[in-house]
Image: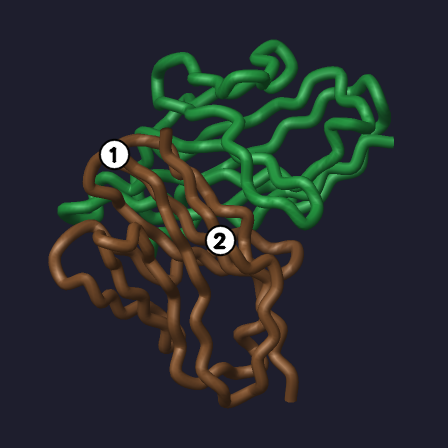
Amino acid sequence: AQSVTQPDIHITVSEGASLELRCNYSYGATPYLFWYVQSPGQGLQLLLKYFSGDTLVQGIKGFEAEFKRSQSSFNLRKPSVHWSDAAEYFCAVGARGNKLVFGAGTILRVKS
Amino acid sequence: GAVVSQHPSWVICKSGTSVKIECRSLDFQATTMFWYRQFPKQSLMLMATSNEGSKATYEQGVEKDKFLINHASLTLSTLTVTSAHPEDSSFYICSARDVGGGPTDTQYFGPGTRLTVL
């Protein structure tokens, strides 16, 4: 069965510091992988997605993620965090035409 | 592009009444829409998959008679919470799958509807 693990429930980083949010997935076939961000009381915004090709994916707001098949990981990174990046981040795995399975989410706090 | 709206954004109702939530894809056609429920500080749990012109597919444990889903057009799906009770209070989020946007398909999410049942 598909599953997604986000090991970190909370992460706190200083503004301007680099960020890496971890995501590990379990899926039998080639996965489609997504990162979404959710601000309090809001819906989800797609940051980036990986379907195939280049394993380093660029997204919006300066985020990127790298797909590593050998580690079953799809970690999200940003070189310099801004206070406005404080939110909850969800990693998800899905197959074409199928439903998404979400991780538990990681809450990012940015301290000034 | 790829904007999904939900209406209402929040609703308060009395126990025993029914509430309808609309999900619309504004600039693309969505043959499939999904309904999720999110409890405070938790992840999204898929409730059902809504297919245009056919019956919705419900996830295990979701009462289909309580959560009625209708997907009457390629841009509109509705979720009706029937005979709502306080335990139905939650944040309901829909998403729409864009199959016409290119070689891949992606779910785009609405802003969510906060339901409070008194």
Classed neighbour count for the residue bearing mark 2: other residues with Cα under 10 Å, few (<14), some (14–19), many (≥20): many
In this rendered view, identify the residue nearer to me: A53 or B91.
A53
Instruction: Answer left or right for B70 relative to B100.
Output: right
Which chain, by letter, is green? Answer: B
Q: Secondary structure at mark 2?
A: loop
x and y percentages locating residue A71 in the rendered image: 28, 54
B117 vs B54, left or right, is right
Pointer 1: residues within 10 angstroms few (<14), some, or many (20+)?
few
- B83 or A51, nearer to the observer: A51
Going from N to C along the chain, the mark reached first, 2 or 1, is 2
Identified by mark 1, the residue type is Gly
Residue on which the image places disc 1: A28
Residue B95: which quarter of the image? top left
Display colour for chain A: brown
Number of marks in the rendered image: 2
Instruction: Assign the C terminus of chain A to one quadrant of the image.
Output: bottom right
Q: Nearer the viewer, residue B77 or A46?
A: A46
Q: Mark 2 = which residue?
A: A6
Q: Give how far across and how far down residue B34 sits, in percent.
A: 44, 32
Q: At 80% from the left edge and 23% from the top edge, which residue is drawn?
A: B85
Image marks 2 and 1: residues in contact by CB distance under 8 Å:
no
User: In the rendered view, does B92 fall on the left or right side of A90?
Assistant: right
Cα gap from disc 2 to disc 1, whole angstroms: 19 Å
- Picture coordinates of residue A66 (x, y %)? 27, 64
* Residue at position x 85%, y 27% in the image: B14
The label shown at residue A84 is none
